[in-house]
Amino acid sequence: MSILSVRALVIKTLAMLIVALSAGISVFLAAPSTPAMAQQACPTGVTYAGDEAPNSTLKLQMPFVSGEYWTVGGGGSFYGNNFHCNSYNDHYATDWNRPNDAGAAVLAVADGQVSASVGAPCPTGGYGCRVTIEHADGYKTTYAHLQDVKPGIVDGSKVKTGMQVGFVGSSGTTADHLHLAFRRNNSSTCNTSGYCAAGETLMPPQGHKPSPMMTALGPVNLEDGTNYQSINGRGYLPNLRTASGWQSVTVTVKNNSDQATTVNYYYRDSGGTNACNGSQAVQAYGSVSLNPSCAWFIPAAGYIEADRDVSVTVANRRTSPVVEGTHTGVSAAVVWGPFNLPLVAKRLTTASGLADSDIFVQNAADTATTVQVQLVAAPGSGYTNITRSFTLNAYGTLRYSLKVDGSVPTGWVGSAVVSAPASAVVSDFFAWDGQTDFAYNAYPSDNKASSWYIPLFMVRRTGATGDASTPISVQNLTGNNTTISTGQMVLSCKAAPGWTDFAVSNPSPVSDNASYSFNPATDLTLFPPSMTGWWGSCKLTVPNDKKVLVLAQIRYPANKNASAYEASRAENSDRQLFFPVIKQRLGDGSATAVTIQNLNSSAVVSATFYYKGEPALCAGSGDVTVSDSIPPDSNLVHNHRLPNWFLPDGWCGSLRVVSNQPIDGFGQITNINTYASGDTIQAYSALSRP
């Protein structure tokens, strides 16, 4: 908010006091000042707001579009760091403003569910038009004084970090600004009464403050009157392989919105020093392909921004030998870390030849930082844990190749934990001594869960692209040095028609941060010869007091092809999926397949597939809509590698899937002409939304 006049500040304070009283919130008035009476302090161990106010346990983003600059406080509300007696029950409030801020998009600062929304015509007093979102761990945010609520945001709506909920306005107050109220459990952390300094009014002490908050500086404790740049909605690109000598990189961006947008892209060298940028328009629900290049340097990393929700894939390609790997852009919502990689190796001898890992870490902030990589040896491997530290410049990128690290012994295998204040992490896992690559995004620790789906599981199954198997790596992230005992990792699999359901479990204990792999390609004990050809979907569970991450691979040993994707958390409640890259048997042989998993154990999914054609790229590619159903706990594959499916051959574009039940899925990109002469099979996880 701009600097408020005394009159405006009085009006606002009275309006908020009325709101507090009408909501049944206790308000204490100051007792007469008496020198003989000492001020009462909160007991030790509880907070009396201010510098002692505890930080939020939520990982918060700024409530604005990535790239925008906004000032917090600066004469408006900045309760909690200074005059703590002037506050509301467990209420930490911040006002945000900038020049010409009316109508600016207001975004959710964290995942949650809308518990209250008041749209136009806006009330003339109090908070005016507003949206309240309930988050994890008892937190609640209110976005107040809005011009209006975004259409579709209603009571009960589920929202993701970065989704728009409203527009900046001045309803219920005198000047355009966003009033962001932050509460936890609607109760005070200290109820002791006392006396305030002269001129202040005693009210209940405040609770947690909305800090640290992620900004372009990284996570910061908000300071009154300070200007910050948002990264909410930004997609990071840590691995642009042209900087490693590969021949091409294609970044595909899908607009997930029903309104057109402009995609802004920014590329940097590995040191973060040189930069170039550009922009491109994208139609509603459309997609665009970018080929990162800069006139005076080779880009090593970058990021994507737009004023609408977008999904991003990055496809790297080397021509000799042919090796391809695809991963998704890393959302700013998860750059807090730490990040986990369930499968990491150095010169490991496997049934798929020698295996090695490259780990890419992009500094997501414009300040230098330190990155720590903890290598956790696999149980029973005979190796020890190793920790490495690196310094990254602002926006710099690290390529950590275990193959050339002399401190890591040959044959080392295990998992990795990457820690940095703000970073984006992906990994390339190479097999057959570098002849094949599966790229995958590192997992934020917050993604850990007790139950996971593997949408497509195969046991030495023969198909058009060779014999395929689906090894999965399960990393124990329970914490507190907790071991998952033998038999507690249970893989329960639901068969496709003609096969039989089965269940297997881990034959040995798995220590904290370590991984265990179920490998149907080579393990003839858990997956005997009688199971050869089996396929279907699986569910990996551990006891509720244990937490894991699951990485799924698809390997074609005979053809030296491999890909990987992140398995699906069973607790995911999203009902929309976005796939930026769809190809139906193009002339160069490229084609895709998408696998959709029904995350409901009892209800049938009714799904609508909205294929958005890109005729400017592939002539004759029109929009196509198809409906389908998926049984409980089962999957559905739309295989665009099959000739003249419901899409015409030569079609290209993107896909949005809308369901009546929670779903998740992944996409595969293949080349039906050349899969036998190089690694041309790739996979990426779909972006899910409520």
Image (tube, rainbow, N blue to C red):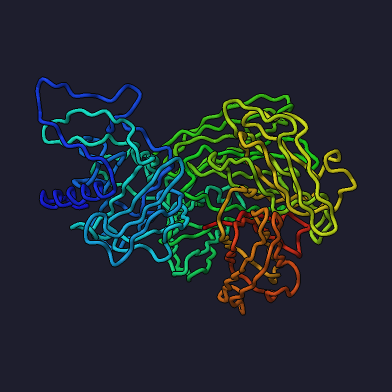
Question: Which residue occupies the extreme top position in the image?
Answer: 36
Task: Classify residue 166 as left or right of residue 415.
Answer: left
Q: Residue at x 40, y 47 (%)?
A: 61
Q: Nearer the viewer, residue 304 or 151?
A: 151
Q: Nearer the viewer, residue 618 or 277?
A: 618
Q: Position of residue 128 (x, y in %)?
A: 26, 58
Q: Quadrant of residue 30?
A: top left
Question: Which residue occupies the extreme right position in the image?
Answer: 530
Q: Residue at x 76, y 44 (%)?
A: 432
Answer yes or no: is residue 247 visible: no
Q: Quadrant of residue 280?
A: bottom left
Task: Classify residue 461 as left or right of residue 399.
Answer: right
Q: Residue at x 81, y 50 (%)?
A: 501
Count of numbered circles in the view: 0
Q: Position of residue 472 (x, y in %)?
A: 71, 43
Q: Quadrant of residue 26?
A: top left
Rendered position, 73 above or below 277: above
Q: Nearer the viewer, residue 25 or 171?
A: 25
Q: Nearer the viewer, residue 85 or 285?
A: 85
Q: Position of residue 325 (x, y in %)?
A: 65, 52
Rendered position, 646 above or below 394: below
Q: Residue at x 44, y 69 (%)?
A: 259
Q: Position of residue 308 (x, y in %)?
A: 43, 62
Task: Classify residue 462 as left or right of residue 615.
Answer: right
Rendered position, 591 above or below 338: below
